[in-house]
Amino acid sequence: MKKFYDTCSIMEDNSDLSDVIISSITIQELENIKTGNKDKETKSKARAAVRAIKSQNPKVIIYNPLWEEEISNRSLEITNDNKIIISAVKSGCDYFYTEDYLCGLIARDIFNLNIASAKERSEIYKGYKLIEGSSNDITNFYNNINFDDWVINEYLIIHNTEDDTWSEQRFDGSKFVNLRLPNSKYIKGKNSEQRCALDALNNENIDIVAVLGGYGSGKTYLCMQMAKYNIDEKGRASKIVGIRNPESESKEVGFLQGSFEDKTSLFFAPLEDSLHGGKYELDDMKRYGKLSVEIPYYLKGRTFTDSILVCDEAEDFSESEIKLIGTRLGENSKVYWCGDYKQSVMNKSTSNPLAKMCSKLKGNPKFACVCLGEDVRSSVPKIYSEIFDD
C-alpha cells in the first residue's frame, strides 16, 4: 500500500517511511519550519522529520509547476497545501495522510483521494476543529462540508488568514450555531478556545464540561468564574463544590496536624487564585454555604444536588476517582473538569484517565470539551514550560 504523507503527517509519524511518498514541497516546508517563528515543539518535530527523511530515504515526488493548471481548474488557489495534494494525485498513492482538516476535505471531496491520519486514534479529543485559510478556502469548506465528520457540541474555529479574523460556532447535531456567551462585563474570552469554553460552561443543556489546557491557559479561572456566574447571575445552581486530589510534583511534606481544613487548605489555593477576591472571597463563599472543598477520599456515599462540581488538576484523578466523582451528581448538578494530562503526576500520556474520559464521552449530548492552547497568564511561564518541555 502506497501512503502519501503531507508535512503535518510526517512531523507526527516518521518512524517507518519505507512505503511513504512525500512531495518536494514538504521538504521545503520542513526547512522553513526549522528556522522560522514556530514554537519549540513544532521546530523539534520538523527537525526529527528531516533526520528521518535523510536516514530512511522515502520516495520524493518533485513538484511540477505545470500541475498548477489542474489546481486552478478546480477554482483553488495555488497554495502549498494544494501543491502537495496534486503531488499526491500524481503519485498514484492509495492513501493521502494529513492532520489538517481543511486540507483533508479538499483532498477527499475535490481530488477524490482516500484520506487518513498518522496520529494515534487514541489521541485526546480537543473538542474543536480549526479551519485556516483564505476567504475562498473557507467558502469551499462550507460548500463541501460533511456533517458526518462532526459530533454534537464540537466547535468550529475559523481563522481567515487574509484579514487575521477569528470566528467560532458549535455543532448542535444537525447544524452550526452561534455561541451563546455570558455578559462580557462579567467575563470575556481572550481567544477563540476560551470563547468556546465559555459557551460550553454557559450552556444549560451541557452537564459535563472538560476545559483542558497547559500552563496559564486559564482553565481553572474560566471554570470557577463560570460556576459563580451560573449561581450568582443565572440562579442555575446554589453551590460550588471544589474537588482536588492532594498530589504534588514535589516531595512528600510529611504528617500535617489539624483538621481537614488545616490539612487541605493549601491544596485549594489555585481555586482561591481564580476568584477576584482571593482567600477573602473563598472564605466568604464558604461562610454563606456557596462553596465547599472536597477530596475524592471522602466522597463515597455523597450526593450533590443543585451544585456545580469544579474538579481542578483533574489530570491527577484515577479512573475510579473520575467514576466516583461523576456518580455523585444529583438533581440539577453539573461537573466541570479542568486539567492537562501533560502535567499529570501519575500519567502524562494520552492514556491518562482524563484524556480517556474525553475520548469516551465524545458525541454525548450532555458533554463538551475544549482544549485551550495559548498561555494567557504572562510571557515568563511560557519560557519555563518550553525550556523543560519533554
Image (cartoon, rainbow, N blue to C red):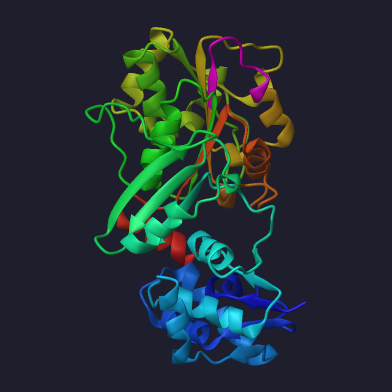
Can you give x and y, in whole percent of width and height, for residue 268 in the image?
48, 29
Q: Nearer the viewer, residue 260 or 212?
A: 212
Magenta segment's dominant SS is: loop
Q: Residue at x 68, y 43 (%)?
A: 356
Q: Quadrant of residue 133?
A: bottom left
| Side of 95 where 98 appears, left or right | left
Can you give x and y, in whole percent of width and height, for residue 333 in the image?
54, 15
Residue 91 visible somewhere in the drawing:
yes
Can you give x and y, in whole percent of width and height, for residue 267 in the image?
51, 32
| 121 in the magenta segment | no
| Side of 71 where 37 appears, left or right | left
Q: Residue at x 56, y 70 (%)?
A: 111
For the magenta stretch, what is the residue range?
Answer: 326-335
Q: Quadrant of the N terminus?
A: bottom right
Residue 250 visible somewhere in the drawing:
no
Residue found farthest to the front: 73
Q: Above or below — where is 142 with respect to 117?
A: above
Q: Residue at x 38, y 52 (%)?
A: 158
